[in-house]
Amino acid sequence: MDPNVRPETMERITTPALAEKFIAEQVAAIKAQVKDKKVLLALSGGVDSSVVAALLIKAIGKNLVCVHVNHGLLRKGEPEQVIKVFRDEMDANLIYVDAVDRFLDKLAGVKEPETKRKIIGAEFIRVFEEEARKLTDIAFLAQGTIYPDILESKDGVKAHHNVGGLPEDLKFDLVEPVKLLFKDEVRVVGKALGLPDNMVYRQPFPGPGLGVRCVGAITRERLEVVREADAILREEFAKNGLQGKVWQYFTIVPDFKSVGVNEKGERTEGYLVVLRAINTRDAMTATVAEVPFALLSHITDRITHEVKGVNRVAFDLTPKPTGTIEWE
Ligand code: XMP
C-alpha cells in the first residue's frame, strides 16, 4: 500500500469524535515511529504546522523542537500568538528566531516579485538550517504536508515540501501526521486539539507573507502600513460577521504616494491602501466578495485616521481572471 495514497475506506473527519479517534491513532503512530528521538518542526503558526505541532507535543512532549522564524513579513500579532499558544500554554520546546533585520536587509531595493519570493524562500531555509545545525541530536523532521500538497506535487503543479531544500547532510526522516487529510479535516483535528479558533479557522496566508502585499521594493515604513491596515481590516471583518465567510481578505500598499488634503486644508502626500476581499473554491478563479458599503466606509475612515502616512483607501473590484488574488 502506497503510504501517500488515501485509502478509499478512510472516513472523512467531520466530527469531534472522529477527530479524537484520529488523534489517538496518530499519537500512537508517532510514538512508535520516533521512540525517544528528537523531532524538528518549522512552526509558522499556520493551521497545518500548528496542528502537527499540537499532535507531536501530545505524543512526545519536549522531544519536539519547534522553530518559529519571524521574517518580519507576518501579520500583526502572529509571532506573539505562536509564543503564547505553544510556549506558554502547551509548554512546548520552542525556539523563536528574530530574523527580521536579516530578511529586510536582503530584500532592500528588490522590486521584482519573483525575485522577492526567491529571496524569502532561500533565506528561510538558511535560517532554519542554521538552527538545525545548532541542535546535534535531531533524528526526524516534522512537516505539515496535507493531502492536496501530495496530489498537486504528483500532478507537477507545485513542490509541496515546506522546508524542502535543506542540504544533503541534513536530510532527516520525515514525520507527516496529517499528510492524508484535507484542509477541512485538519481544522476539525486542530479544534479537537484545543487550538484557538483564530488559528484553526485562519484564512490562507502566502509563504512570502506581507512581502508580496508591500508592492515593489519593501520598505519598513510601507510594511508597517500594510500590517496595521491589515489588522484593522481583519478586526472589522471579525466584528461584522465576515470572518470565516469571506475566503481571503487583506490589504495591499503600492509603492507610490497619492496627493491628498488633511482636515486643516493642507496638502498631503500619503500612501494608498487597497482592500481586497475575494471568494473562491480553489484559488484558480475568484469572485469579489460583496462587502457592505457602510462597512467599507468605516474601514476607510479608520485606516486613514489610525494608520500613519495613509491618505487614501480603495477597494479592488477585480475578479480572477483578470487579476490574480495577490497583486504581485
Ligand atoms: P494568486 O495571486 O496566484 O493567489 O491568484 C492564489 C492563492 O495563492 C496564494 N499565494 C501564495 N501562497 N506562496 C504561497 O504560499 C506564494 O508565493 C503565493 N502567491 C500567492 C494567494 O494568497 C492566494 O491564496
Image (spheres, rainbow, N blue to C red):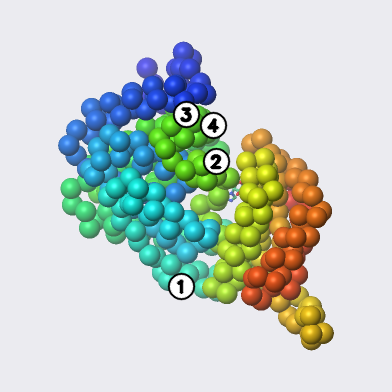
Three-letter amino acid code at the position of disc 3: Leu
Circle 3 or circle 2, nearest the eye? 2
Q: Nearer the viewer, mark 1 or mark 4?
A: 4
Kind of residue at badge 2: Tyr
The reply to whether discs 3 and 2 touch (Cβ–Cβ < 8 Å) is no
Look at mark 4 in the image and give the residue it sits on.
184
Mark found first going from the N terminus, 2 or 4: 4
* Drawn side of residue 10 relative to residue 88, left or right: right
Report, in whole angstroms, how far the alpha carbon at label 2 lies from the one at label 1: 33 Å
For the residues labelled 1 and 3, the Cα–Cα distance comes to 38 Å
| Cβ–Cβ under 8 Å for marks 1 and 4 | no
Q: Residue furthest top?
A: 9
Q: Which residue is identified by label 2?
A: 201
Question: Crowding at label 2, few (<14), some or many (≥20) Cα neighbours within 10 Å?
Answer: some
Image position, residue 53 (x, y; %)? 36, 42
Q: Amino acid type of disc 1?
A: Asp
Q: CA distance from mark 1 to mark 4?
A: 37 Å
Q: Which residue is mark 3?
A: 181
Chain-order first, disc 2 or disc 1: 1
**Residue 145 shows in this picture:** no
Name the residue rendered at 50%, 23% in the picture.
15
The image quadrant that residue 232 belongs to is bottom right
The residue that disc 1 covers is 105
Observer-side mark, 3 or 4, equals 4
Contact (CB < 8 A) between labels 3 and 4? no
**Which label's residue is closer to the chain start, 1 or 4?**
1
| Distance from the alpha carbon under mark 3 to that under mark 2 | 16 Å
Please identify the quadrant where the N terminus is shown: top left
Q: Image check: 186 left or right of 85?
A: right
If the image is split into quadrants, where does the C terminus sit? bottom right
Regarding mark 1 in the picture, which secondary structure is present there? helix
